[in-house]
Amino acid sequence: MKTSFYSYSLPELRALFEAQGLSATGAAKLYHWRYKHRAPASGNELSKATQSYLQENMSFELPEIDRVQEAGDRTVKFLFRLADGKKVETVLIPSNRKYGICLSSQVGCAMKCSFCHTGLQGLSRNLETHEIVGQLLGAQRWLSEQRPGKDRIATVVFMGQGEPLHNFDSVRRACEIFLSQHGLSFASDKVTISTAGYLPGLVRWKAEMPGVNIALSLHAVEMKKRDELIPINARFPLDEVLAQIDQIPRNRKRFVIYEYLLAKGFNDSVEDAEALGEKLKGKKAFVNLIPFNPYPGAKYERPTEEEARAFKAVLDEHGIPTLIRFTKGTDILAACGQLNSKPPTG
Ligand code: SF4
């Protein structure tokens, strides 16, 4: 059976070539062509032996695009069909003339967050590295064809379906490919992994993850409320998660991003904001406030803009840089926690 080229970091590909008696420099050339030129290596770049090895043993297939939905604000949501027929979603989020891409790391998710459409589906399986990298390359190819000249993907976030740290190895390798200078050459501060607080992955992060940004879905400081929103909080309590994040070495300028979903009348009071300000005291924190984006059958409501601003004002007083994120692409359900989902029926 052929293995996917897009599952190999460059050191792994070099090692594979060497083990096959092929020139390791061919690995860097192949990487360069596939990722920089987005094309097969030209005729005489690779030896005959390398070419025939690739032909027999390696696949360069990308996930197929099953459906594309374009929102009025230029957000694009892709449904990709994987080789086994399972489907995952990926979203391109416009920002000036560029895009950020929101990737999925699993088919479904085991974390069961109460505000999340994906969480309702349960976990089907982990994505392989090539299925993660393939989402970016497939979206890039679509952009280059459909919106030439305005097709640059500048940032990557793991904020789609799945808990990325629950699929640590594939996500780590995908990040290595994104950061590789011979690969996609993203700067490390342009790649962000968002976690619900999956502690076993955070414990591994320090020694194994390349220097990408971390974002924590914090969402509530009071334990009962956080238990309701993010059930894994009962196994991996917030204070242990925060302590673990504090141990991850970071560039001096680097902030940890704390995501806070604002659900009207649930976690959006001035007292909740005060508790958050106290919890993040002394940390290099950046807070994203996300007013809940309701979907049919959802159990939470969206606060008014005024209520969101009142919450932000408290964090401002605590000196914590904070942005209110008014979600994009809501007309195609592309907002956080709403991927690969149909509105519940009945
Ligand atoms: S919010 Fe993220 S971690 Fe929680 S259930 Fe949804 S996809 Fe999983």
Image: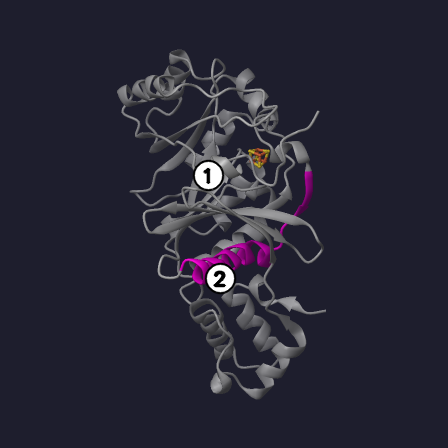
Disc 1 secondary structure class: loop
Q: Is residue 77 placed above or below 59 in the rendered structure?
A: above
Question: Residue 165 appears at what percent x and percent y?
Answer: 56, 42
Q: Is residue 234 placed above or below 28 in the rendered structure?
A: above
Question: Residue 292 appears at what percent x and percent y?
Answer: 48, 25
Amino acid bearing label 1: Gly
Range shown magenta? 123-147
In the picture provided, is 39 more to the left or to the right than 340?
Answer: left
Determine the residue located farthest toward the front in the rendered image: 72
Q: Main secondary structure of the magenta part?
A: helix
Between 280 and 155, the one nearer to me in the picture? 155
In the picture provided, is 254 more to the left or to the right than 229?
Answer: left
User: Could you tell me which quadrant the N terminus lies in?
Assistant: bottom right
Ligand 1 shows up in the quarter that is: top right
Question: Residue 3 appears at what percent x and percent y?
Answer: 65, 67
Residue with the mark numbered 1: 329
Amino acid bearing label 2: Arg
